[in-house]
């Protein structure tokens, strides 16, 4: 078992990585939280795949447990659904010394984190991410966001609230549809680009999903180590942690254009396009080492990830103007000097358009 510690003072916690964790996590969660009750928030399908095993492990450890199943959709990440979860927790009698467990992907992680931060003014919660994307990204760092149906809309409500622990079971990846497996690997490529040359080169060497599955624990360990480092030095994502936003300015604009519809484009796919387009331009501008774009293109295509979009440039540029990193007339974007070395670069907003041509 790998254990990676995030040192955040009183909010410090460990990330455990091991195959088969979902069926034997009960004693560790009991010892970590001291809870007598646990509510597992999970999603359609995941409840049947992994929920039963986790419930048994918790109850065998003496923790009374209930599952709350939410729809597996971006549309679930809202205050209306949170209100329903509060009602289920009240019926179950979950107290301030008990624990919430997120068993699912990013949506479930956000729902659980927000609920934990606000139930009894804050209770313990555990992240048990089930997708590669959430295992190496959203489950780590305590960043929680919800959506509003009106006005500000996407990611308008949120907070930072650190989990008590993160349990990562790499074996879960084998039950993911191929597209969503590669969606998460796009996030891993991003982390390699900005902070770990050896991680990126690993993707240059593998030639099949079977090979990737064999080295997946190593991929996850490297990604988690990177994420943990940036969470420690920038827990509120105000500065250096924004290095991890490589590809997000263009990628986020693409997602907005498609109204965050995973059926049309996933987060990892949109980020892949963003990484490629911004690197192609930064290489032309002399900000990135020559040959970097072709290496990135090779890896993304090998993972069946896109490098272009059919969205017209003018529409995409307008969408980019909604990026939350814009301050006045400038925006700080992430570029790479070369594979494994990212840096923050400030440009006028009016120059964003050239990065998508």
Image: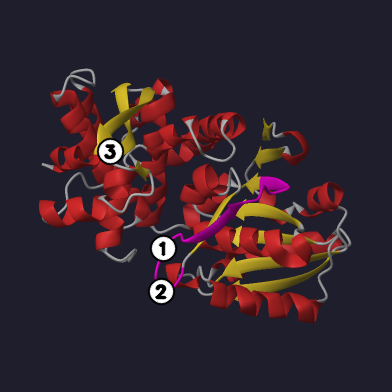
Q: Earlier in the sequence, mark 1 or mark 3?
A: 1
Q: Nearer the viewer, residue 159 or 286?
A: 159
Let me know if residue 163 is in the magenta part: yes
Q: Residues within 10 Å of mark 3 (few under 14, many from 20)?
A: many
Q: Nearer the viewer, residue 79 or 63?
A: 79
Q: Earlier in the sequence, mark 2 or mark 3?
A: 2
User: Magenta region, mostly helix, strand or loop?
Assistant: loop
Q: Nearer the viewer, residue 43 or 315?
A: 315
Which residue is found at the position 69% from the left and 72% from the top? Answer: 67
Let me know if residue 9 is in the magenta part: no
Q: Pointer 2: what residue?
A: 150
x and y, in percent, of residue 176 in the image: 45, 57
Describe the element under mark 1 as helix, strand or loop: loop
Q: Which region is colored magenta? A: 148-166
Image quadrant holding the C terminus, namely: top left
State the CA–CA distance, disc 2 to disc 1.
9 Å
Q: Pointer 1: what residue?
A: 154
């Amino acid at each position: 078992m790998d254990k990676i510690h995030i040192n955040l003072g009183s909010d410090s916690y460990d990330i455990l990585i091991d195959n088969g964790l979902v069926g034997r996590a009960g004693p560790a969660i009991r010892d970590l939280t001291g809870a007598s009750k646990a509510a597992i928030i999970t999603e359609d399908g995941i409840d049947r795949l992994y929920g039963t095993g986790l419930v048994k492990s918790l109850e065998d450890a003496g923790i009374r447990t209930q599952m709350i199943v939410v729809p597996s959709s971006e549309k679930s990440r809202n205050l209306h659904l949170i209100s329903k979860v509060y009602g289920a927790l009240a019926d179950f009698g979950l107290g301030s010394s008990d624990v919430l467990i997120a068993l699912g992907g990013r949506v479930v992680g956000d729902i659980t984190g927000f609920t934990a931060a606000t139930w009894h003014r804050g209770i313990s919660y555990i992240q048990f991410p089930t997708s590669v994307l959430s295992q190496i990204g959203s489950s780590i760092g305590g960043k929680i966001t919800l959506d509003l149906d009106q006005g500000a809309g996407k990611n308008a409500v949120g907070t930072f609230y650190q989990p008590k622990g993160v349990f990562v079971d790499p074996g879960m990846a084998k039950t993911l549809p191929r597209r969503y497996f590669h969606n998460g690997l796009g996030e891993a490529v991003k982390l390699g680009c900005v902070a770990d040359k050896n991680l990126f080169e690993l993707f240059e060497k593998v030639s099949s999903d079977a090979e990737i599955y064999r080295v997946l624990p190593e991929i996850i360990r490297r990604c988690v180590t990177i994420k943990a480092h940036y969470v420690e030095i920038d827990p509120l994502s105000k500065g250096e942690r924004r290095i991890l936003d490589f590809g997000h300015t263009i990628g986020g604009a693409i997602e907005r254009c498609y109204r965050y519809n995973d059926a049309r484009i996933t987060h990892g796919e949109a980020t892949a396009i963003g990484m490629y387009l911004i690197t192609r331009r930064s290489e032309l501008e002399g900000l990135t080492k020559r040959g970097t774009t072709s290496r990135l293109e090779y890896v993304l295509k090998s993972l069946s990830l896109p490098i272009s979009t059919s969205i017209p440039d003018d529409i995409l540029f307008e969408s980019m103007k909604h990026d939350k990193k814009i301050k006045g007339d400038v925006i700080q974007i992430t570029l790479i000097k070369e594979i494994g070395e990212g840096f923050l670069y400030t440009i006028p907003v009016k120059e964003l358009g050239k990065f998508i041509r």
